Amino acid sequence: MSKSEDNPDMKVLKTATCKTLSGKSTLTYQIGCTADSTIHLRIAKNSGGGFFSDEWVSLDDILRVLNDRPRESPVMSHFLTRILKGKSANTSGFILAVLTHLKLSRPLPKKKRVHELLDPQPFLDQVDKLMTSGGTTKRTVKKAPSKKAAVKRRATTKRKTSSA
């Protein structure tokens, strides 16, 4: 485990690679955690020519945004742009590729860019092991709510004004 050079408060738990959704290049991504054990992801490198933002993005925020999408809509990368700083349009697609590699999502049959969310628990269990082996306390990532809870949350969210 090492500290992130650009964010000394972020402990890098794992660095890995995966293909982009198009399969044309390879991404290097990192899984990190803060002192309060909040899990973050980021894209660190791209073997292709596409620009991307290397910002750390909270897994809580990623799962919240994807669970708050319209109920009838599949998971698509553009939903993630709300939580990104906007340095590159590629970043959201790259994050979706990472989520697929981590088995947090999977493409719908015969569609590369349209996904469905999967149960995050196996991934969270792996992160717990990484954190334990690195001397960090257990994660604070919230489990994805049930569909019923997500529908209820969407209904109440529409009534509130957004501060973002």
Image (spheres, rainbow, N blue to C red):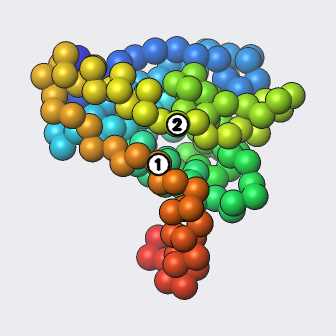
Q: Is residue 121 visible?
A: yes
Q: Residue at x 68, y 40 (%)?
A: 116
Q: Residue at x 49, y 83 (%)?
A: 160
Quarter of the picture containing the N terminus is top left
Q: Which amino acid does label 1 sit on?
A: Ala
In the shown orientation, is residue 41 left or right of residue 140?
right
Q: Name the residue under label 2.
A: 119
User: Which residue occupies the foreground of this view, 64 or 92?
Assistant: 64
Q: Mark 1 points at which residue?
A: 144
Query: Considering only vertical position in the picture, is 111 above or below 162?
Result: above
In the shown orientation, is residue 71 left or right of residue 30?
right
- Structural distance between the alpha carbons of marks 1 and 2: 8 Å
User: Which residue occupies the foreground of this view, 30 or 150?
Assistant: 150
Q: Residue 78, labelled with which disc?
A: none
Q: Position of residue 46 (x, y in %)?
A: 58, 21
Question: Could you say whether the residue bearing mark 2 is in a helix, strand or loop?
Answer: loop
Q: Which amino acid does label 2 sit on?
A: Asp
Q: Position of residue 148 (x, y in %)?
A: 56, 62
Q: Are marks 1 and 2 in contact (CB under 8 Å)?
A: yes
Tag count in the figure? 2
Q: Is residue 81 visible?
A: no
Q: Residues within 10 Å of mark 2 (few under 14, many from 20)?
A: few
Q: Residue at x 16, y 28 (%)?
A: 136
Q: Residue at x 54, y 85 (%)?
A: 159
Q: Position of residue 67 (x, y in %)?
A: 56, 54
Q: Where is residue 13 in the image (x, y as percent from the top left)?
A: 30, 22
